Amino acid sequence: MAENDSFHHVLRGLGPQVEHRGEVIVIGLGRFGSSLGRTLVDMGHEVLGLDLDEQRVAEHSDSLTHVAEVDTTNVKALRQLGVGDATTVVVCIGADVESSVLTTAAVADLEVPNIWAKAMTEPHGRILARVGAHNVVFPEAEMGSRVAHLVTGGLLEYVALDDDFALVEMVAPDAIVGVPLGESNLRADHRVTIVCVKPSESGFTYADRDTVLDPSDIVVVAGHRSDLERFADR
């Protein structure tokens, strides 16, 4: 496999499929790490948040299950906190590249089976993958790409599934309003598929051949990027 192809898999988070168990460890409690940790807690997971900054640790003592002030580049310190027993560790250190890489390498030395790491640039991401991260994410770049699709078209939400396939949320285009979806020839004429629909007065539900859309209905559509853009323009 070529290096660029390998990196593409890392970018898209296609590391080994690991069934998570127990506490999630989040290293780095900046904006990204703290938001990730709080969301995991809201989802019902126990979260141990680690950071070298005493103030950050104190700020998140109430929102995360456990927090600790520690030098996360130190393998011995991580082992004492039980990081080696974790299934999933997320390294959320971004701007301090040296600390990010050394921390990821330390976690890898502890043989954690599911290591996620935040990268700021492609070279940063390549290094993280080489020192042991199973999955590398680029939150700033991915957010920028997503927002670009939202501000330049008629989309309400955009989720890339790979380089050329996505799920988008949009108001139902006029071309498919008022007729059953089974008669709209979506796949033949537009090369897209409506996955679900949200009528104006209720929540999301499945879309089927008999579904008739109103002008104010919201639809979630799957397809290739260029096909989705043309469909949204309608």
Image: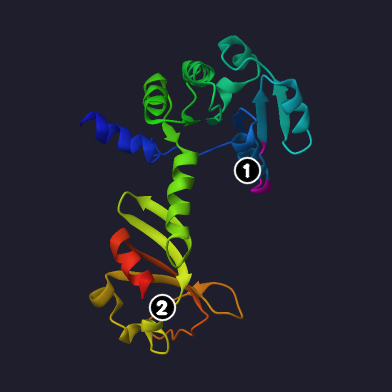
Q: Nearer the viewer, mark 1 or mark 2?
A: 2
Furthest-front residue in view? 152
The answer to which of 140 and 118 lies nearer the viewer is 140
Whether residue 22 is visible, yes or no, is: no
Q: Find residue 172 and report its image quarter.
A: bottom left
Given contact means CB atoms under 8 Å apart, are the residues at marks 1 and 2 in contact? no
- Say which amino acid is labelled 2: Pro
Q: Position of residue 94 (x, y in %)?
A: 53, 28
In depth, the one of 143 and 44 nearer the eye is: 143
Of mark 1 and mark 2, the one earlier in the sequence is 1
State the SS at label 1.
helix
Asked whether the viewer can see residue 171, the reply is yes
**Looking at the picture, does residue 106 appear above or below residue 188?**
above
Relative placement, left or right, of 207 versus 21 is left
Residue highlighted by disc 1: 40
Q: Amino acid at mark 1?
A: Leu
> Residue shown at 45%/37% (left/top)?
138
Q: Residue furthest bottom?
A: 178
In this view, the residue farthest toward the left is 1
Q: Predominant secondary structure in magenta?
A: loop
Q: What residue is shown at x 61% (from left), y 27% (from top)?
A: 28
Residue count near mark 1 (Cα–Cα under 10 Å), binned few <14, some 14–19, many ≥20: some
Q: Quadrant of the N terminus?
A: top left
Identify the residue position indicated by label 2 in the image: 173
Q: Quadrant of residue 16?
A: top left
User: What are the residue bounds of the magenta stretch?
Assistant: 42-46
* Label 1 – label 2 distance at C-alpha: 36 Å
Q: Is residue 44 magenta?
A: yes
Q: Position of residue 104 (x, y in %)?
A: 49, 21
194 relative to 94 in the view: left or right: left
Q: Is residue 142 above or below residue 216?
A: above
Quadrant the C terminus occupies: bottom left
